[in-house]
Image (cartoon, rainbow, N blue to C red):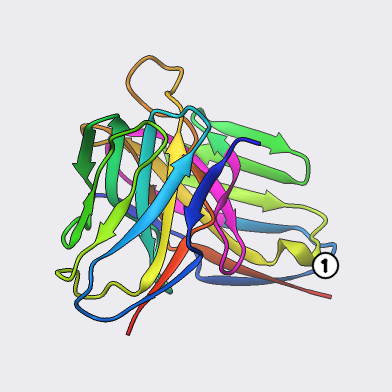
Amino acid sequence: GQNIDQPTEMTATEGAIVQINCTYQTSGFNGLFWYQQHAGEAPTFLSYNVLDGLEEKGRFSSFLSRSKGYSYLLLKELQMKDSASYLCAVRVWRGYSTLTFGKGTMLLVSP
Amino acid sequence: DGGITQSPKYLFRKEGQNVTLSCEQNLNHDAMYWYRQDPGQGLRLIYYSQIVNDFQKGDIAEGYSVSREKKESFPLTVTSAQKNPTAFYLCASSPPGTSGRGFTDTQYFGPGTRLTVL
């Protein structure tokens, strides 16, 4: 089966840096995605890692270690608008290509 | 503008009635998906379609049905057999991956339909 773990909630201050961790246990791994979801809205794609290492996109970076089944999303220079849920999703092959999602980490950014 | 549309945004139905949720995309994506999201839960896959006239059950297909008669459209019917239909329903689509091994690329989501069954 698939198992993806993320912290349920995190809090941080505007301007700070926050790291959201994701651990997974899965077979047929073929990449890890991070999505941002504001309350009542659709998830929006943030980043994708298929090889080990760090991917940087502006204020957001994502890291993957396949041997450890571990990823993190790093958010720098936090802004109030970054308050949202962050979803970790693993792409696997189950006879077809599919994503398995974690339950999401709710990030609250305070002034 | 290319994108995925879902309608309506809010939907109310009486218990025992079937209801169909619309999902349309003009991104020319082959693969389309339906997910359900409940509070405190991750997204759970209901149905998946890789091409027209073909679809597969996901993890929680019981009480749901789909059709894929056109590439652009993937409607989901929530039947009276679904015991807890009240939820946020999300449709997504993705282009083929570039690895040549059958994996699809990034999934992009529509705005969602919040269904409430009274």
The picture quadrant where one finds residue A55 is: top right
Q: Residue at x 42, y 48 (%)?
A: B23
B51 up-or-down from B33: above or below: above
Whether residue A69 is visible here, answered yes or no, is no
Say left or right for B80 vs B89: left
Say left or right for B55 vs B21: left
A21 up-or-down from A93: above or below: below
A86 within the magenta span: no
Q: Label 1 marks which chain's residue?
A: A
Quarter of the figure with the C terminus of chain A = bottom right
B16 up-or-down from A58: above or below: below
Whether residue A57 is visible here, answered yes or no, is yes
- Image x and y of residue B28, in percent: 48, 27
A69 up-or-down from A11: above or below: above
- Image x and y of residue A16, in percent: 81, 62
Q: Residue at x 36, y 26 (%)?
A: B103
The picture quadrant where one finds residue A84 is: bottom right
- Image x and y of residue B27, in percent: 53, 31
Q: Nearer the viewer, residue B113 or B94?
A: B113
- Residue span colored magenta: A21-47
Number of numbered markers: 1
Q: Residue furthest bottom?
A: B118
- Image x and y of residue A60, in percent: 71, 46
Q: Nearer the viewer, residue A109 or B88?
A: B88
Query: Mark 1 belongs to which amino acid?
Result: Glu
Identify the residue under disc 1: A14
Mark 1 neighbour density, 10 Å: few (under 14) some (14–19) many (20 or more): some
Say left or right for B79 vs A73: left
Kind of element beneath mark 1: loop
Q: Residue at x 32, y 85 (%)?
A: B118
